[in-house]
Amino acid sequence: MKEIGEQHLTESGLVVLDITAADDETARRVVAELSQRWATSGPPVLRRTPGLPGVSARVYADIRRIGTEAP
C-alpha cells in the first residue's frame, strides 16, 4: 500500500485504517459497518500479498462526520 500522506491527517478527527481480514466478504463487511458510523472513503480496493494470509484494505475516515446511518 502507498505511504500515508500528510494530507490524510491534516486535522484532528481524520484517521487512516489498515484492515486485514481472512476473506473479501469479511473485509467488505467491516468497511460497510464503519461507513454507517462515520464518513469514509467508501468501498476499498482489496489486496492480497503473496505468502501472507488474508486480504488487506485501507480506509480513510472522518470521525467528526456521521456516516450513512444517522444516530
Image (cartoon, rainbow, N blue to C red):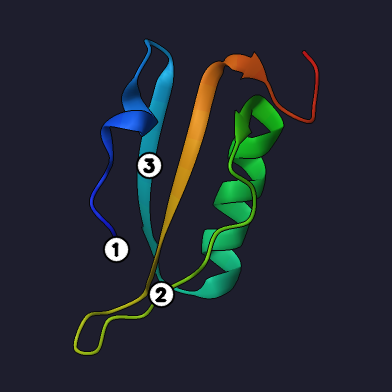
Circle 2: element type: loop
Q: Which residue is mark 1?
A: 1
Residue at x-position 60% and y-position 69% = 25
- Circle nearer the viewer, 1 or 3: 1
Residue at x-position 48% and y-position 74% = 23
Task: Determine whether label 2 and label 3 are within 8 Å by CB.
Answer: no
In the rendered view, tell whether residue 31 sits above or below residue 23.
above
Q: Position of residue 19 (x, y in %)?
A: 38, 53
In the rendered view, tell whether residue 42 sits above or below residue 24.
above
| Gap in angstroms between the C-alphas marked 1 and 3 | 12 Å
In the image, what residue type sits under mark 2?
Answer: Arg
- Circle nearer the viewer, 2 or 1: 1
63 sits to left or right of 17: right
Residue at x-position 52% and y-position 66% = 45
Q: Check disc 2: other Cα within 10 Å, few if <14, some if 14-19, many if 20+.
A: some
Q: Earlier in the sequence, mark 2 or mark 1?
A: 1
Q: Earlier in the sequence, mark 1 or mark 3?
A: 1
The quarter of the displayed image where residue 56 is located: bottom left
Task: Determine whether label 1 and label 3 are within 8 Å by CB.
Answer: no
Q: Earlier in the sequence, mark 2 or mark 3?
A: 3
Q: Which residue is mark 2?
A: 47
| Gap in angstroms between the C-alphas marked 2 and 1 | 9 Å
Residue 17, label in figure = 3
Residue 52, label in figure = none
Task: Determine whether label 2 and label 1 are within 8 Å by CB.
Answer: yes
Depth check: 43 or 33 in front? 43
Circle 3: element type: strand
In the image, what residue type sits under mark 1?
Answer: Met
Q: Which image quarter holds the N terminus?
A: bottom left
Query: Among all residues in the image, which is located at the extreme front?
Result: 7
Residue at x-position 55% and y-position 59% = 44
In the image, what residue type sits under mark 3?
Answer: Leu
